[in-house]
Image (cartoon, rainbow, N blue to C red):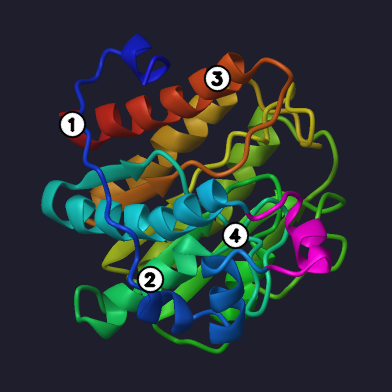
Amino acid sequence: MEALALGKATFTVHEPDPMPRRWIEAVHDPAYVEEVATLNVPPEKERRIGFPVTDRVMRRSMLSPGGTWAAAKLAMAHGYAANAAGGSHHALYDGGAGYCVFNDLAIAANRLIVEGEARRILILDLDVHQGDGTAQLLAGRDDIFTLSIHAEKNFPVRKAVSSLDIALADGVGDGDYMAALMDVLPDTLEHFAPDLILYQAGVDPHVDDRLGRLSLTDEGLEARDRAVMREARRRGVPLASTMGGGYGEDRMVVARRHAACMVRLAEEAVSP
């Protein structure tokens, strides 16, 4: 909130409800969901996640998919909304990974389609790490398109197969990144024709991110986000964003990057 208060855009805060377990279990192994819900995640699974699954982590993990689902519903009503969490794109069917417990993107997308809120959803993943969990959980579906633009040599070592993957070399900066993005995004929107975009808007492609391998500047991240929203608006497609990755020693610096992302997406969503 403190970081968001630095922006010029006005915003309304909505508190999500936890995602009902039946929708989490529609995507994840019910046995794994039970392990999380009862705080009985085996140590080897916790190591893959990267932290212990405590009561607080469990509650956050249930709320995060609810937040992405709620943001999507609000975006369909207003054009844009953000989940100030979420983007847990490494979570797999029977376990978490890479600081992700449940895959809120896959869970929310599946629920929206099953309930008839959307017919075709694009999950646009611009985190520096490939959205491997999302790709695996949604493989073979023709109503959800997964597009991941990521650093080729970054986590995960073993990449999954998204609907479309763009792997970038270490050190790619603003110009080459934007060229890669604009080479595929407009065509994907034209040919897949989604009626909703879920945007994993990780800020870890930033040059100063401690877990990134790309070299985007603040201006590059801004250009990325504004271009995504412009392409969505041009086609009248609502967009909901999730926070995704961002890592550094100064948490407020990273928080301001996330806040700036949400602010400029909101600004672009209502610009003349």
Total number of numbered discs in the rendering: 4
Q: Position of residue 137 (x, y in %)?
A: 58, 79
Q: Residue furthest left?
A: 77
The tag earlier along the polypeptide, 2 or 4, is 4
Q: Position of residue 65 (x, y in %)?
A: 41, 60
Disc 3 target residue:
219
Disc 1 target residue:
12
Q: Position of residue 5 (x, y in %)?
A: 32, 13
Q: Is residue 184 visible?
A: yes
Disc 4 target residue:
89
Marks 1 and 2, how far apart at CA = 23 Å
Question: What are the residue bounds of the magenta stretch?
Answer: 41-53
Marks 2 and 4, how far apart at CA = 12 Å
Q: Amino acid at mark 4?
A: His
Disc 2 target residue:
109
Q: Amino acid at mark 1?
A: Thr
Q: Amino acid at mark 3?
A: Glu
Marks 1 and 4, how far apart at CA = 26 Å
Q: Are marks 2 and 4 in contact (CB under 8 Å)?
A: no
